[in-house]
Image: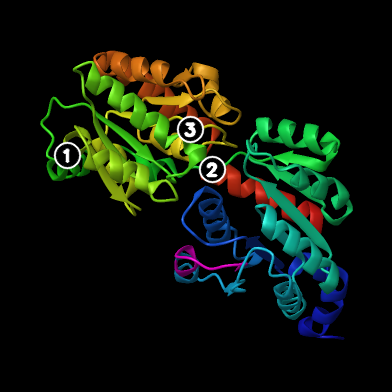
Amino acid sequence: MPGPYSLLPLCYIIFGKSMRRLRICQLITELQPAGAERCLLELARRLDRGRFDVHAAALRGGPVADQLRQAGVPVHVLGMRGKWDLLKIHALAGIFRRERFDLVHTHLFHADVAGRLAAIHAAVPHVVHSVHVAEGRFRPWQFFWARMMADVCDRIVAVSYAVRDFHSSRCGLPAKCYMVIPNGIDASAYRHDETKRHAMRRRLGLTPGDILVAFVGRLDHQKGIDVLLSAASHLGARGKPIHLVIAGDGPQRSLVENYIAHGEGGRFCRWLGFCQDVQEVLSAADLFALPSRWEGFGLAAAEAMAAGLPVIATSVPGLQEVLDFGRAGAMIPSEDVITLTEAIERLSVEPEIRRKLGEVGRRRVVENYSIEANIAAHERLYEEIAG
């Protein structure tokens, strides 16, 4: 009579697909600290290691690569000289072939182009693509690409319903091509910390009665940092200057530096650069402002809500959903400096409204945008497609 171990080869033949871990590659354009990159980081390090063997890959590197490696995630960086260094696609296909991935999950447009072409070349059986933004710039080729290559993608993941509707309408793809998985927040990592609040406010030279407005994000035209600085200037001109702390870096860094260098900006505005401890910044603040021109979700706004901060944000797709269309925060029109000025002025003198908005916002994030729900939804998707 055969022993128990002699049945293992037969069991593997019958059940092998479900017994072994699915091999997943998370591919992104670069590994700089920004929203989509943070989503990839959380996904790669939180997927169930008993069911998934996860690698990360990027066309270009960045600091997030070190965080991935510290979490035990193998990282492949192609080192493209430019986003259209097509010779590297052959190298990417070689990685796919060598690692024998069951599924490649691409994030952002250039990684999606390289990833789908390399997946075809390496005969990767399944591809998933995440759309992170309702693109506000003129980029018709991105939607043409998605429509043309629809057969080389099992599912398009949208980070909000607004992104799904936006992308579907421009690509002409049916709803069955999409799955909405909202971004996830580890609310406990951003919970208000009174000790950190006092420490940061001392560093900023604030008194207990000073109202501090925070901005966290890339210093980019998309995020409307120029609109926020204009609102701060208007408040100063009215004799009601606000204290402003800005955490982040990017192509519009010079706008912030010039604002601080001239007039009252140097007295009332502090720029921290890229900040590792976002919880410290949010704990120190009394208000959070995100005057984005376009978004897909608004990860920074959700993190501020998790910290219990009242949020002022523009009424653009993605942010509208996160703020529950104005029920979980104050919404203003995009590009509207005067309305932003008035919203900051009004909330700065209404502590009870700030408290209520903060409570509603935190509850919304905890109940609707948990990181656990985000990871579980991706795990179900991967197993449905490749398992």
- Of badges 2 and 1, nearer the viewer stands 1
Q: Earlier in the sequence, mark 2 or mark 1?
A: 2
Q: Quadrant of residue 82?
A: bottom right
Q: State which quarter of the image contains the C terminus.
A: bottom right
Q: Is residue 13 above or below residue 48?
A: below
Q: Earlier in the sequence, mark 2 or mark 3?
A: 2
At 57% across and 26% down in the image, what residue appears? 316
Q: CA distance from mark 2 to mark 1?
A: 29 Å
Residue 309 in view (yes/no): no
Residue 350 vs residue 355, the one in the foreground: 350
Q: Which mark is residue 365?
A: 3
Q: Residue at label 2?
A: 184
At 47% across and 44% down in the image, what residue appears? 220
Magenta-tinted stretch: 56-66
Q: Earlier in the sequence, mark 3 or mark 1?
A: 1
Badge 2 density bin: few <14, some 14–19, many ≥20, Cα 10 Å: many
Residue 96 placed where, x, y %? 74, 74
Residue 143 placed where, x, y %? 78, 43
Which secondary structure, mark 1? helix
Q: CA distance from mark 2 to mark 3?
A: 9 Å
At 82% across and 45% down in the image, what residue appears? 144
Query: Is 63 a magenta residue?
Result: yes
Q: CA distance from mark 3 to mark 1?
A: 26 Å
Q: Residue at label 1?
A: 201
Q: Amino acid at mark 2?
A: Gly
> Is residue 293 rendered to the left or right of residue 93?
left
Residue 322 in view (yes/no): yes
Which secondary structure, mark 2? loop
